[in-house]
Image: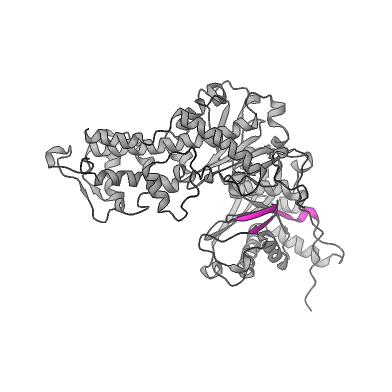
C-alpha cells in the first residue's frame, strides 16, 4: 500500500454514511422525547418559558446585557417594526478581583453601575427626565410602565431556569469563582443592584444565546413564516427550537413559573452538544477516543466534540501526527531533495504545534478547504507559518487537504442530524401557512406594538439605523418555493459562516433522510442570524415584558 493510500485509509475512517445519518436522526428523536419527559436525560431539553417568536413588526426600545466571560456588554436596541433595528453598545472588561470576589454583591453592583453609565451616556434625556419626575411626584407613584426599560440578561454560565426571568446559578466557569452566588437567582441579584441605583430598568428575561439566535432570525427573516430553529455551529454547538407545549410533559403544572400558555408552544433549549454521550450511534475513531480521554470533560459533550470548532482542529492534528509517526508513511518526509517538487527537503520544527495538544486551530481547516491555488501554495504557506513545517511538498499539501476535508465533511453531515430530527418532529414540512406558522410565528397582539414612552423614543433618535445583519443561504435549487411551505432556520457560528461547503454537505445529508428527502430539503431556508445575545435578548425582553410587570418602584427621597 502506497503512503497516499495510507492517508486515504485514515480519511475513510471519517466517512459518515447515509445509513449512519438515518440512525443518528432516529436516536436524536428518541433522546428529544426522553428529554421532554424528565430531567437528567442526555439531551437536556430545557424549557425557556419563551412562548412566542417575533414576526418583524415589533417596535420599541429595549436593553440587553451579556455576561459571557471576561467582558460585560450593554446594548440598547431600537426595533423599527420593519425587520430592521438600530443597535448601540458598550463593552467593559470585568476586573479580575470581581471574578473571584467574596460576595456576589461586588460583581453585580459593578454590572448595575455599567448599566447606569450606559443610560447616562446614550439615553441621558430619558434617564434624567425620569429622575426629575420621580423626585417631584407623589409618594404613592412609581415608575410609569412606559418609562421602564425591559432588559434581556444573557448569562452564559450553567443555571437552572425556573421562569422567563428566574434562574439559579449551578456553578461558575470561565475563571469566575464567587461561592456566595451559587444557588442564588442571578436575575434577582442583578435587579437588586439596579434598584439600589434607582434605575428605570427591569430584568425581564434570562437569555440563552442560542434562543436569542432563533429570536433574532425570526425578527429579521423574510416572509411571514416564523422561525422554527436557532442553531450555533461555531466554537461550540447547540440548538433551540419551537416545541408544542403539550409535549413538554416534564414541565410542572404547578411550578409557579409565569408564562403565557395561550400560544400552545414554547421554545426549548436542547443543549444538543451532549447528544448521544453513550455513543450508541455517533462515529468514534481512535482520534475521537484519544481527544475525549485527554479532554477536561471526558465522556460528555460527545456530539460537540465531533462537530464544533473547538475540537475539529485537534482531531486533524492527531490524525496528521499519527501519520507522521508511521514509518511507512512519507508525510512531511523526503529521502532527498529530488523527491520534493520544490527541490528541498521538508522539516518539522522540534517545537511545532503539531506535537502539542490543541496546537492546531480549526480555522486551519477552513484555509485548507478553500485553497484552490496552483500547487496548493496557500496550504504550504500555512503549514510553515502555523505549524513550523517548512518546504512541504505538493503531495504533503494534498494529503493534508484530504484529511481536513474528511473531518470537515463529517462535521457538516453530523450537523444535519439534529436539524432533520427537529424539522421532522415539528411536522412543518408540507403544511400550509396557517398551521406551519401557528401561534409561535407571531407575538400576541398586545405585545407586538409595545413601545417605551415618548421620552424613550426621543432618546433613541439620532442612533444610526442599520439593516439587520441577515444573509439568507438559499436552498438547493432555491427558487420557486411557496412561502407557505418554507421551514425557516437561523444559524450562527464560524463553521456555518466560513467553512467552505459546510452547508452543501449538510444539505446533502438532509436529502438522504427519507422524512426530509430532496423535496423537503428545498423547503428548508437557512439564514445567518447574528448577535443572539444582543438583538435576540432584546426580543425576548419584549415578549417577557407583560409577564414580568411589577408594582411601581417607590420614589426617590431627597437626602436630608
Name the side, left or right, on which 395 lies relative to 486.
Answer: left
Residue drawn at the location 51% of the way across and 68% of the way down: 96
Residue drawn at the location 69% of the way across and 45% of the way down: 250
Instruction: Tell me the quarter of the picture where residue 343 sits.
Output: top left
Q: Look at the image and give the residue range highlighted in magenta.
A: 143-172
Residue 526 visible in this rendered orientation of the protein = no
Q: Quadrant of the C terminus?
A: bottom right
Instruction: Tell me the quarter of the picture where residue 27 sits.
Output: top right
Name the side, left or right, on which 207 lies relative to 293.
Answer: right
Instruction: Tell me the quarter of the picture where residue 185 sits.
Output: bottom right
Q: Is residue 151 magenta?
A: yes
Residue in the foreground of this view, choosing between 15 and 96? 15
Q: Position of residue 137 (x, y in %)?
A: 84, 64
Q: Position of residue 279 (x, y in %)?
A: 48, 42
Residue in the foreground of this view, choosing between 135 and 479? 479
Q: How is the image coloured?
A: one colour
Q: Quadrant of the N terminus?
A: top left
Residue drawn at the location 23% of the way across and 53% of the way down: 349
Q: Is residue 296 magenta?
A: no
Residue in the foreground of this view, choosing between 18 and 237? 18
Task: Count the numbered circles shown.
Answer: 0
Amino acid at each position: 500500500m502506497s503512503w497516499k493510500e495510507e492517508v486515504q485509509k485514515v480519511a475513510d475512517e471519517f466517512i459518515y454514511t447515509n445509513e449512519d445519518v438515518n440512525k443518528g436522526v432516529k436516536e436524536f428523536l428518541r433522546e428529544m422525547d426522553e428529554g421532554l419527559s424528565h430531567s437528567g436525560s442526555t439531551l437536556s431539553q430545557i424549557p425557556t418559558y419563551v412562548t412566542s417568536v417575533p414576526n418583524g413588526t415589533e417596535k420599541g426600545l429595549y436593553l440587553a446585557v451579556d455576561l459571557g466571560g471576561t467582558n460585560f456588554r450593554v446594548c440598547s436596541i431600537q426595533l423599527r417594526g420593519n425587520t430592521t433595528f438600530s443597535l448601540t453598545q458598550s463593552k467593559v472588561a470585568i476586573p479580575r478581583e470581581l471574578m473571584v470576589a467574596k460576595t456576589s454583591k461586588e460583581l453585580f453592583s459593578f454590572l448595575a453601575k455599567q448599566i447606569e453609565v450606559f443610560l447616562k451616556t446614550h439615553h441621558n434625556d430619558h434617564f434624567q427626565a425620569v429622575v426629575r419626575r420621580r423626585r417631584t411626584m407623589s409618594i404613592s407613584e412609581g415608575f410609569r410602565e412606559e418609562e421602564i426599560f425591559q432588559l434581556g440578561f444573557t448569562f452564559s454560565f450553567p443555571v437552572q431556569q425556573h421562569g422567563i426571568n428566574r434562574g439559579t446559578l449551578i456553578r461558575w466557569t470561565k475563571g469566575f469563582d464567587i461561592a456566595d452566588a451559587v444557588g442564588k437567582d442571578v436575575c434577582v441579584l442583578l435587579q437588586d443592584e439596579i434598584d439600589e441605583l434607582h434605575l428605570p430598568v427591569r430584568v425581564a428575561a434570562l437569555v440563552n444565546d442560542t434562543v436569542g439566535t432563533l429570536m433574532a432570525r425570526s425578527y429579521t427573516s423574510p416572509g411571514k413564516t416564523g422561525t422554527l430553529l436557532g442553531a450555533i455551529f461555531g466554537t461550540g454547538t447547540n440548538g433551540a427550537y419551537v416545541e408544542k407545549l403539550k409535549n413538554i410533559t416534564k414541565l410542572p403544572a404547578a411550578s409557579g413559573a409565569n408564562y403565557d400558555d395561550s400560544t400552545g408552544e414554547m421554545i426549548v433549549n436542547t443543549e444538543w452538544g451532549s447528544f448521544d454521550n453513550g455513543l450508541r450511534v455517533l462515529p468514534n475513531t481512535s482520534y475521537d477516543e484519544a481527544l475525549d480521554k485527554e479532554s477536561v470533560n471526558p465522556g460528555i459533550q460527545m456530539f460537540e466534540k465531533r462537530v464544533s470548532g473547538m475540537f475539529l482542529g485537534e482531531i486533524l492534528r492527531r490524525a496528521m501526527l499519527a501519520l507522521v509517526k508511521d514509518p511507512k508513511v512519507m508525510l512531511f518526509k523526503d529521502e532527498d531533495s529530488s523527491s520534493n517538487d520544490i527541490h528541498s527537503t521538508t522539516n518539522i520544527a522540534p517545537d511545532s504545534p503539531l506535537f502539542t495538544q490543541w496546537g492546531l486551530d480549526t480555522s486551519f481547516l477552513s484555509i485548507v478547504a478553500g485553497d484552490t491555488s496552483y500547487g496548493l501554495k496557500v496550504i504550504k504557506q500555512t503549514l510553515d507559518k502555523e505549524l513550523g513545517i517548512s518546504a512541504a511538498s505538493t503531495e504533503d499539501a494534498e494529503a493534508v487537504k484530504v484529511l481536513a476535508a474528511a473531518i470537515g465533511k463529517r462535521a457538516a453531515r453530523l450537523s444535519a442530524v439534529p436539524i432533520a430530527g427537529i424539522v421532522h418532529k415539528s411536522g412543518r414540512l408540507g403544511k400550509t401557512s396557517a398551521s406551519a406558522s401557528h401561534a409561535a410565528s407571531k407575538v400576541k397582539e398586545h405585545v407586538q406594538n409595545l413601545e417605551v414612552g415618548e421620552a424613550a423614543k426621543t432618546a433613541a433618535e439620532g442612533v444610526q439605523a442599520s439593516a439587520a445583519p441577515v444573509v439568507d443561504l438559499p436552498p438547493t435549487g432555491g427558487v420557486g418555493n411557496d412561502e407557505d411551505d418554507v421551514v425557516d432556520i437561523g444559524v450562527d457560528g464560524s463553521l456555518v459562516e466560513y467553512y467552505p461547503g459546510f452547508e452543501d454537505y449538510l444539505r446533502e445529508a438532509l436529502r438522504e433522510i427519507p422524512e426530509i428527502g430532496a423535496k423537503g430539503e428545498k423547503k428548508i431556508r437557512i439564514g445567518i442570524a447574528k448577535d443572539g445575545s444582543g438583538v435576540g435578548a432584546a426580543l425576548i425582553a419584549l415578549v417577557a415584558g407583560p409577564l414580568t410587570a411589577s408594582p411601581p418602584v417607590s420614589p426617590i427621597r431627597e437626602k436630608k
